[in-house]
Amino acid sequence: MTTPSYEIALAIENLTVSFDGFKAVDDLNFYVQKNELRAVIGPNGAGKTTVLDLICGKTKATAGTIRFNGVELTALSEHKIVQAGVGRKFQNPSIYENLSVMENLEISFPRGRGVMGSLLFERTADVVDRIHEVLDTIFLSDHLHTQAGLLSHGQKQWLEIGMLMIQDPELLMLDEPVAGMSVSEREKTADLLKRISKGRSVIVIEHDMEFVKRIAHKVTVLHQGKMLAEGDMDSVQSNPKVIEVYLGH
Ligand code: ADP
Ligand code: MG
């Protein structure tokens, strides 16, 4: 017997959340593989952000299951979900503007176990190595000591991605990461996401179709809390239902 070359990391089944009777997510089934970079698109109000809120535990499901590497996330607190390997970037960067780039990355390092002298030194060396690796990935190696508040909008977004990368999540979720970025920043972000999707799963919500085309392995289209279409970019772009509710506008 041969083992399939893919492996499901995230399995969402029959997921529903209702807000005062309004179903923002409605009986959704959604699967993401390891090493996959999935784009989620759809009109405003489709439920895209709410799906991320449900995965990271910010919003509690009304019904359904969210299994990540076999662990049921709907029963866990937000903190435990982070510990299970889920990292999530919100639309507005939540960085510490008064701290340097380096300090922002330092404080994102997962808190260790008990602090003992010898272990502390070892961990510090690890921390520094990891920070330099991440700085390189997010194009900020030359801005180690720059105050985060002085970075460009795009650089702030990269810094927040870096703060998540420090924790080395197995699932990274990003909500509209290139909104407000210049064309060249978008191109660099596409490269960045392609690189960091190796060895983990990435879910990106984005409206910029050029960007989605550049990065996504597979695209999921949400509409009224349900899946409208799913497949490669070409099949989704030529799908009449998708054109009607989203791309045609
Ligand atoms: P998208 O990200 O696709 O634009 P959202 O997931 O933000 O859409 O929202 C989907 C729908 O759910 C919207 O109609 C929104 O107003 C509603 N909604 C989202 N969160 C809440 C909440 N906490 N309480 C009430 N309604 C909400
Ligand atoms: Mg949204």
Image: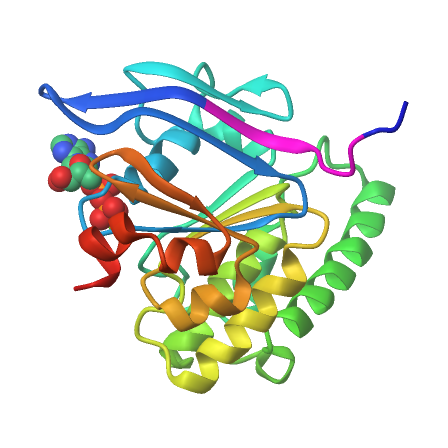
Given residues 56 and 116, the one toward you in this image is 56
The location of residue 39, given as percent across then percent down, is 45, 52
Say which residue appears at 60% left-offset and 72% top-offset: 191
Q: Quadrant of the C terminus?
A: bottom left
Figure check: 182 above or below 62: below
86 vs 186, nearest the viewer: 186
**Residue 46 place in picture, x, y as percent:** 22, 43
Report x, y in % for residue 178. Answer: 39, 69
- Depth check: 65 or 108 in front? 65
Q: Quadrant of residue 196?
A: bottom right
Is 148 inside the magenta-drawn segment?
Answer: no
Give left or right: position of 42 versus 129. Answer: left
| Residue located at (25% from left, 48% from top) | 241
Examine the image and state in which quarter residue 55 appears.
top left
Instruction: Using the rendered image of the protein, determine whether residue 165 is visible from the camera's viewpoint.
Output: yes
Q: Is 225 displayed left or right of 10 in the figure?
A: left
Please provide the residue range marked out in magenta.
4-12
Q: Determine the residue positioned at 51% across, 79% down.
A: 187
What residue do we see at 41% from left, 61% from top?
Answer: 95
Asked whether 131 or 202 is in front, the reply is 202
Q: Is residue 8 magenta?
A: yes
For the N terminus, the quadrant is top right
Q: Is residue 147 visible?
A: no
